[in-house]
Amino acid sequence: MNLVILDMRHVIVLTILWWLPRLTAQPIQLKIYSEFQRVDPFGEIVAVDRAEKPREILSPAVARNAYASFHIVVKTPPGTPFILYLGQNPEDTFKLTLYREWFTQAGGMWIPDRLERVLEPYDSRLQPRAEDIAGRSVTAFWLDVWVPAEARVRRVRLEAQLNVSDRWVIAPMEVRIRPARVPDFATSSGPLPPVEAPADQAALGPLRSFLCGAEEPVATGPVCVRRFIRRNAQQDMALARELERRLGRAAVLEGILQAVGASELEAWCRQPSGRPGLGAEWYLRVRDYLLRTAQ
């Protein structure tokens, strides 16, 4: 009789041990991605943006008098309330603007595109109902980080802080403010690729304009991920023009072509694409070259 009772106790203990991780390990995640890695409502990188080795956003370099942008992705069990905070040290180094990303269905994919500015901290309990997407577990954000022109060249801790009930998850970055300063320039709206196109295609217009002398027609559109990617590329090309004045056009062209994996300008201009062999985040290599050269 005692043996039976002991065996039953073992069964109960083993059952509890089996279920305990499943009860306590809730799927709560907080991740930061580059602007070229859009995440769908289920926590996966959108198919057209997937990279073999996505860049880890741990210590991004940024220019002064310019924006740097990131996707912040919160993954929680459906219906679980959360609060998202942003922190920086030293305080008030950057001006931070947070947008909620709304998903749209295109090309057989759910893609974050339209942006709605939200206050920080973001309390999900006070927000409009999310899109009705079966199996959805993600709320996605676009973070604009404005780096003032007079910012000191240094490292600044910037982090997203997620609070779910009594749990905290932190996603930190050590942002490196570089000597590069983007000159003032007049931004212009231009045509955007379809929402289902790879995210990097939104940067091609400004890059092609600089490299190939192509003029872009003026166009208007909603505040969206694609438009902000284009704006950031315009900033980069403003810096490229400043370097052109200092170093000469030939030197800058050579550096950018090397970054996009091209050996000949005319061939690239006939069919511009930096992606073959370089991955979905290829454009970041152009930005890396400009920041490195400007210092």
Image: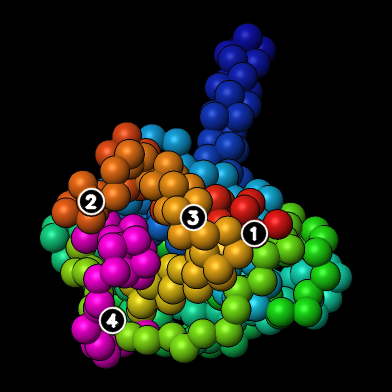
In the image, which is nearer the foreground, mark 1 or mark 2? Answer: 2
Q: Earlier in the sequence, mark 2 or mark 3?
A: 3
Decide if residue 245 is in sight here: yes
Can you tell which of label 4 and label 1 is closer to the viewer?
Answer: 1
Outermost residue toward the top in this view: 3
Horizontal and vertical percent for residue 248?
52, 60
Any magenta on residue 209? yes
- Does residue 139 lie above or below 116 as drawn? above
Q: Quadrant of the N terminus?
A: top right
Q: CA distance from mark 4 to mark 2?
A: 23 Å
What whole-number distance in Å separates the C-alpha atoms at marks 1 and 2?
Answer: 25 Å
Residue 254: percent from the left, percent from the top? 44, 47
| Residue at image coords 63%, 51% | 292
Residue 294: image tag:
1
Tell which of 211 and 38 is nearer to you.
211
Which residue is drawn at the image coordinates 58% and 58% (left, top)? 247
Q: Amino acid at mark 3?
A: Val
* Category of crowding for the residue at label 3, using alpha-carbon neighbours closer than 10 angstroms: few (below 14), some (14–19), many (at least 20): many
Residue type, mark 4 in image? Gly
Closer to the observer: label 1 or label 3? Answer: 3
Q: CA distance from mark 2 to mark 3?
A: 15 Å
The residue singled out by tag 3 in the image is: 252
The amino acid at mark 1 is: Ala
What residue is drawn where x is 29% and y is 43%?
A: 264
Residue density around tag 2, few if under 14, some if 14–19, many if 20 or more, within 10 Å = few
Precedes in sequence: disc 3 or disc 4: 4
Q: Is residue 177 left or right of residue 116?
A: right
Q: Please give the residue where the numbered disc 2 appears in the rendered image.
A: 266
